[in-house]
Each structure stands twice: as structure tokens, then as C-alpha cells.
Image: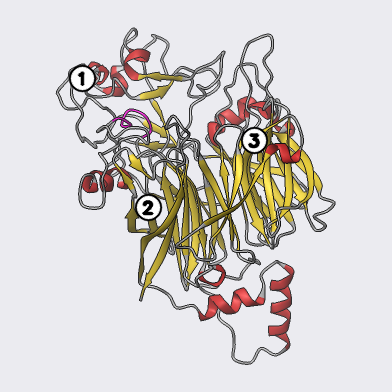
Amino acid sequence: MPAGFDPVTTKFEAKLGDKFDALLEKLAANGIPLAEIIAQSKEKTPASLTLAALSGFGGDVDGTGKLIDTHEIPAYDPASKRLFVVNGSGVGSVEVWNIADPKTPVQVGTLTAADFGTGLAGFNSVAVHNGVVALAIEASPKTSAGLVAFVRASNLSIISKIAVGAQPDMVTFSPDGRYVLSANEGEPNSYNALDSVDPEGSVSIIDVSDVTKPVERRATFTAFNGQEATLRAAGVRIYGPNATVAQDLEPEYVTVSADSKTAYVTLQENNAIAVVDIATAKVTKIIPLGFKDFNVAGYGIDASDEDGGTNTNTGTAAVKIATVPVKGMYLPDGIANYTVGGVTYLVTANEGDARADWPGFNEETRVREHCAAGGMDLSVFGASAANFLFDSNLGRLRITNTPNGGSTGKNASGECSELYAFGGRSFTIWNAATGARVFDSGDAFETLTSSLAGTSGFDFKFNTSHDNNSLDSRSPTKGPEPESVVLQRFGAKVFAFIGLERVGGVMVYDVTVPTAPKQVTYVNTRTGITGDRGPEGLIVIPAAKSPNGVPLLVVANEVSGTTRLFEIKLTY
């Protein structure tokens, strides 16, 4: 929204006359329609909310019983009442579902990469605005230039397409609808091989004022090449073998400010956020996120799947959330933004991710494997430091062997002096202007899921994964793994919906006061090893755009290949 306008705090004088007209013009110029302003001003503020499962679809299998659905990202067009869902299974597709009756979704179409040309691997993301569907399409090989294509939501006719950077991983419209932004991740195919290719990461800014003739400008990171030492000193992880800064930075997810002027882009593996000026297509800042101290009360983790014993390497699984001398790299995936009192805040889902998926480099190790030979630095970890190497303590916790720029986290004597784990196991709120952390949910996700696991309506074991239902299986590896976050305003309150990729389900927080969010509800529709597992993408459909006049939450689940629709029940 325009600077200084906040529907939570802005009040109008009874007689504004020409001033009111001028204000409306200003709002319209910034992409804020009058109807939306009026709707927000009239909407009652709920005391709380709950989520009720309404319907679902997907989870199809072939003749051998093998799952052929992998639902990942949803997007909705209110005019046609169509839901678009990226299906990453096999060659990939985008499924089109009519949800005019959200209780009984009906599939009405399918898009495939072949519809848009040759040399394309599949879809990574989808977004919708004013009847236009934007599709992020990865090339084959992934290191080649990707594509963003545009189709009509109503009839799936192709409008246009345009080349973007390598591996467009996420696509979104600016609030005013003028731009489409694509996070081009640019992952390498390998490191240190003769045929290694490491594309530069980038953010494509596509002007769709005339969607039949889109115009792309590209925000790159080449201006930061040569600044490796400065960035590392600030806390930005630059560590890919032989990579320049532009090659090493990998854009993951984009959120655009309400005034459509600024984009905030997670650089997941780099533990940072890039700030992009849309008008100039320039990266103006890279914000390092720092580390989360798991040794602070309220910030503990369950670090082992064998913690049912004392100083042993043969312990059993148990729930043991405790403070530990480890720091977490936030490494966020999803990001969203909102404004309170004229200040913009960023909300991140701190999933965590390791570079361990391609040949030539693997940063992922375990504490015992990494530290057993040289031991632990007693000056850092205390006289009983050796006990941390037991699997019942920290021995099995997955950490990085490359905290930043080739360092190993060891002192000159070869003793481990720093331990950095993947992910924050939380969501965090940041001041967008300063990069300061104003809130982190601490150990709340693990604490709450541990108390609910196995109780009525929560048929899962604590820190289980999305492909098993084993107690503690994800404790040494990123825990519940918060993947995505979306924000929705109801009246004067703002709520955050956070998907937990591994244990499953959606956490809801009231984030109206950025420094003091409150947990509202949690829903999980998995049933042991069946049901909805691996939530990947979320959207909220507000009541004004909902097919049944009731706000809906849509959750695409990657592992079960299902999409679930929830009714958001507001209580007053």
C-alpha cells in the first residue's frame, strides 16, 4: 500500500472533500482498488478462527499402486472459479479444477509443458491475476533459460511466453497486476566436473501491462561479484566451489510490497534476503539473516532420534526438546510481507536446505562424523564437551561442514568450535528496512506438535516425516520443516498460515502485533502414513473472492499428491 496508509491504523476525517478524492486517486495509482478499501473497512474483526476440512482431490495412483500425483503450488481465479495446481509428478502438469462448489471440485483441464514448446522439463510455480495465469516453466536441462508463459484462466488459451533466467522456481504478480516476478534459482548441475554448469541466480521482472507483449528486465547479482569477503563477513553464505557471487546466490521465493515497488527475495542456501527495486530492476541490498541460538531458553530443539538414553550411541527414539550449544541457519523458503503503522515486516518460514543434491559437493554431515577425530573445543563446549558426540545427545544432528566460504567450524587444532544446523524450525518476523529480527516462534512448533501427537484428530508421531510415521525420525534433520507462509487480513487482524512440510499440517498465528504474535490453531489432516502429507504451497481465498462467500484455505500436499480445501471459520 502507499506509504503511510495502513487499514489497521488509518482514520479519515468526517469531511475531507477534495482531500478524500485525492487520497482515493493516490490509492488507485498504487494498485489499491476502492472496492477493496471499502470491503476492508466494513469487515468485522474476528476474535479468532478455526479451520474445517471441506473437500480434497488428487492422490491418484497407477495400475501398480504407484502415486502419480505430486501437488505443489495452488493459485485461484475468482472470475472462472478455477483452481490451478502444479503437479510435479512425471513430466509435470498444471491441473485445472472448477471449485464453484468447493465441496465437490471437478477437474476441467490440464496444461503440460509440451503445450508451450520443446526442451521444457515441467512447471515449478503458478500465479493468477485478473483472469491471467502465469506459469514458471523449467528447461531441460535445468541450467538453460527457463520460461514464463501466460494463459487465459477461462479457456486455457495461450496468450504469450517469454524467456527468463535458469530454473524459474517461483512466480508471482505484483499487487497492482502490472508486473510478474520470477525467482530464477540457477542451481548448478554439479560442481568441479568437466561438464559442470552453474548459472547465475536472478529475478525476472516482467511488465505485463500488455500481456500479449510481455517485456522482461532482469535483476542480477553481478554487481556483487568480487565482494565475497565483504558478504561473508556480513553473514551471507557464499560457499559454492569456484562460484562467483552471482552464481552462488540462489533466489527461492518472492514477495512484493503492497505498493508494488519493492520485491523481497529469499536466498535460501545463502541464509539471506535480497531487496529488489522493481522500477530499476536492481538488487539494492542483500540482508544477512544471522543465526538462531538453540541454547537460549524457549529456542531449544529435539536434536536426536536416539535420545532415549544417556550418553549412548544405541538409544531409542524419545521426545526430548532441550537447549543445545548449536546455532541454526534460518535458510528460509517461503516469505510474505505486511505493513503495520507504516513499517513493512517480512515473515519467513525457516525450512532449511543443504547443498547435497548434486555431484561434486556435499556440505551435509553429522556432529559425530564431523567432530569425532579432532574432538570438541572445551573452551566453547565445556569440560563435558565429549559427551555431545554421543548419538543420544548431538551425535546424529545434521550440520554443515561449510558454515561460510570454506570454513569448517573448527579451530586451528582441528577441534569443533562451531556447530551450525539447517533451518530454524520456526517462523520469523523481520523489519524489512533494517533487517532486524522482531520475533521468532522459538521451539513452539516442536513443543505443540509433541503435545498433540497421537491425540484425537492428530494421527501422527512427533517429528515424523512425510513418508513415514516414525517417532523422532526428523529430529536430527530440520524437525517439522516449516516450508511456506501466507498472510491474510480479516478486519483489523492479520493472520499467518504456515505449512509444516514434514510432520504436516498448517499452523496459524495472529501476527497483528509483529513483536507479539499469538498461536491460534493447528490442523493436520494426515492419518499415519496416509492422508495429506508434505504441504508445499498455500493460498487463502478471501470471502469476497470465494466461490461460496466464505474464506477458504487451499493446501497443496507434495508427498500425498493431494490438495485440501479448508473453510476458515471466523469467530467474533
Please report the residue visible at 54 percent of the width from the left and 31 percent of the height from the top: 269
Quarter of the picture containing the C terminus is bottom left
Q: Position of residue 439 (x, y in %)?
A: 41, 51
Which mark is first along the chain, 3 or 1? 3
Task: Please say if the residues under marks 1 and 2 sit with CB atoms less than 8 Å apart.
Answer: no
Q: CA distance from mark 1 to mark 3?
A: 52 Å
Query: Tag 1: residue type?
Result: Ser
Whether residue 158 is in magenta: the answer is: no
Of helix, strand and loop, which one carries label 1?
A: loop
Please report the residue visible at 67 percent of the width from the left and 72 percent of the height from the top: 33
Which mark is first along the chain, 2 or 1? 1
Q: Position of residue 335 (x, y in %)?
A: 53, 48
Whether residue 474 is in magenta: the answer is: yes
Q: Count residues near mark 1 (Cα–Cα under 10 Å), then give few for <14, some for 14-19, many for 20+.
A: few
Pair 1/2: label in front: 2
Residue 396's place in the image compared with 546, above or below, is: above
Query: Tag 2: residue type?
Result: Met
Residue 122: mark in rendering: 3
Q: CA distance from mark 2 to mark 3?
A: 30 Å
Query: Tag 3: residue type?
Result: Gly
Residue 437 makes an appearance in the image? no
Residue denoted by label 1: 384
Pair 1/3: label in front: 3
Q: Quadrant of residue 149?
A: top right
Please report the residue visible at 75 percent of the width from the left and 38 percent of the height from the top: 164
> In this orientation, which residue lies closer to the viewer: 524 or 516?
524
Which residues are the magenta region? 473-478
